[in-house]
Image (cartoon, helix red, strand yellow):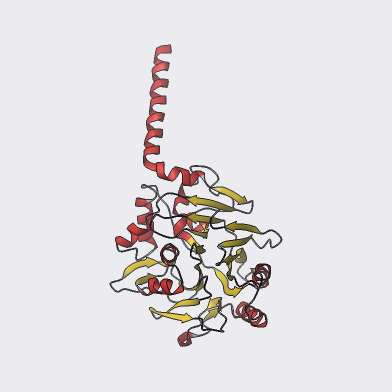
Amino acid sequence: MNKILKRVLITFVAALLVLGIGFYALFNKEISTINSIKKIDDYGFYEINVTSDYGLDGLVESGGAKNDGELVQYVVKTLMKGLPVNITIPDFGCSTFQAKTPEGDWIFGRNYDLDPIPGMIVRTKPKNGYQSIAIANISVLGYTLEKGPDSFFSGLTSLAAPYVMMDGMNEKGLSIGVLLIKDTPTDQNTEKVDLTTTSAMRLVLDKAANVDEAITIFENLDMHASANASYHFQIADAEGNSAVIEYIDNKINVIRKNEGEIQALTNFLISEEKYNFGKGQDRYEILIDTLTEKNETLTEVEAMSLLEAVSQNKVSEDGEITATQWSVVYNNTKKTLDVVVAGKFDKVYSYSLFD
């Protein structure tokens, strides 16, 4: 009996070793990325340092993805080695603006408004692209405030975090944020590379050094809006340039900030063809009035106070909660950012892109 038990135990241990070796061989490049996950705030806010290849160049070279399903298939095959992952982008309301500090730094402010969800600071340093720091909505990957990436195995899905970013800044001082428009989903179909909402943002952060280059990227792709919705984007750089990208009847529309102008954005279209379609006009008015009064000049503390002034915390008639999940001020000149989680404006987390 003892001999039989020994053999069973040896077989079991050997099987575990084989599984462990197989797992390491499969995920050796991803293990350090998963091990880098830290919980920053008890609300459900994390940080990850992505040192593994998330396959953006391969996605573009393969022609891209025409919908969220194709993006999921690519992520499952390339990043997750066949392990299942689901990507679902929810409705959200947001605010963005560009300003400059009294010292001359260009900054980009952003509120991300949604029902309570976990978020993640995502650091990336691709071999063939620019280093960046972004913030992802990881509820898109199936995480909740109760069940986050708090262990190695639960953190596996976070390998897809580079593709679910909602705003960010790269080493050249280019920032971008996406905002929801409740309109017919953009679905362009030409011969260009196909990308979805967040994968297009990832391409911009990885490859664009300024607003002009970001616009060129948008103009040379077919946009397929995620989650049966439509979106517009604000992009801003370290030279003080800013532009809004919108889609009207599947045609791209670029609204550049001219010299002496102020540019901000909420959840309604600003293109002449469909101006004022959407919501968030009240928040937009506060942004524009404040920036005009201050001659577009705000300290980073004042910029965060402006985000607080347009933050949300309300319950709709049907019981849906809309609250600001994070507020962030990117300094595109210094490559730093200040982040507030879940409307707790008395607690600011500060980061540098190059930490």
The residue drawn where x is 62% and y is 81% is 288
Taking depth in this image into account, of 84 and 74 the one nearest to the observer is: 74
The extreme bottom residue here reads: 272
Horizontal placement of 31 versus 276: left or right?
left
Task: Decide: is 40 above or below 96.
Answer: above
Tell me if 79 is positioned left or right of 118 in this view.
left
What quarter of the picture does the N terminus occupy?
top left
Q: How many marks?
A: 0
> Measuring 65% from the left and 68% from the top, which residue is drawn there?
300
Please provide percent x and percent y for residue 234.
Answer: 50, 73
Pick the front one: 153 or 64:
64
User: From this viewpoint, which residue is outermost toward the front?
Assistant: 103
Can you say whether 252 is above or below 40 in the image?
below
Q: Residue furthest left?
A: 191
- The answer to whether residue 1 shows anywhere in this view is no
Q: Position of residue 133 (x, y in %)?
A: 51, 59
Residue 301 visible to an observer of this rendering: yes
Q: Quadrant of residue 202?
A: bottom left
Residue 19: x %, y % from top left: 39, 33
> Image check: 215 left or right of 63?
right
Q: Whole-percent x and y of residue 137? A: 52, 59
